Image (cartoon, rainbow, N blue to C red):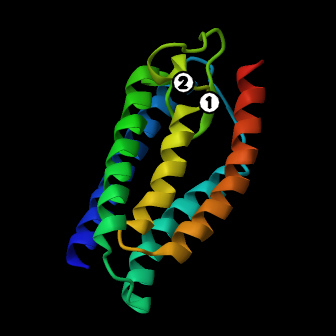
Amino acid sequence: MSAYLVLIGLVVLERLAELAVARRNLAWARSRGGVEYGRRHYPWIVVAHVALLVAAPAEVWLLGRPFLPWLGWPMLAVVVLAQGLRWWCVGTLGRQWNTRVVVVPGMPLVHRGPYRWLRHPNYVAVVAEGLALPLVHSAWLTALAFAAANAVLLTVRVRVEDAALSR
């Protein structure tokens, strides 16, 4: 359980780094006339992600979920790969990357990095991490609950983002 809490702590630190980058990029975008879309669904995304980071270790502790090496090690690899994909997206989009949907008028769509193959690669990372992080320590209820909530939220988010980017 201690190692799992360290992993959760590292993911929390990664999320805080994401938020710092997003805040800086939001200021940059707004200074160039950036327009934010989908403000109403954003707090729900934050709630879902915080709930994931709280519920996974809580489920492990409260329900005595064991570490199963045949499941835990591959899921840890997925978590690490998801982080790599996420930061590849951040690096590729540069100042255009954000946790919010912000469009700067006149900025072209990015078609390099992972965006050569996928329209929304960051969401692939979110889905992969959301399933894998709880399963590192067999917290399957959290994995299922987050997957369901995330499916609803990403359905809304992708629609908002696609509409915003098509303007």
Residue in the picture at 27% in, 58% down: 10
Q: Quadrant of the C terminus?
A: top right
Q: Is residue 8 left or right of residue 156?
A: left
Return the mark for residue 8. Answer: none
Secondary structure under the numbered disc 2 in the rendered image:
helix
Q: CA distance from mark 2 to mark 1?
A: 7 Å
Q: Amino acid at mark 2?
A: Ala
Residue 39 can be seen in this image: no
Graded by Cα atoms within 10 Å as few (under 14), some (14 to 19) or many (20 or more), the crowding at tag 1 reads many
Q: Amino acid at mark 1?
A: Val
Q: Quadrant of residue 152?
A: bottom right
Give the image location of residue 41, x and y in percent.
Answer: 71, 51
Give the image location of residue 14, x and y in percent.
Answer: 33, 50
Q: Are marks 2 and 1 in contact (CB under 8 Å)?
A: yes
Residue in the picture at 60% in, 14% down: 109
Graded by Cα atoms within 10 Å as few (under 14), some (14 to 19) or many (20 or more), the crowding at tag 2 reads many
The answer to whether 59 is drawn above or below residue 9 in the figure is below
The answer to whether 32 is drawn above or below residue 73 in the figure is above
The answer to whether 83 is drawn above or below residue 140 in the figure is above
Give the image location of residue 157, x and y in percent.
Answer: 70, 43
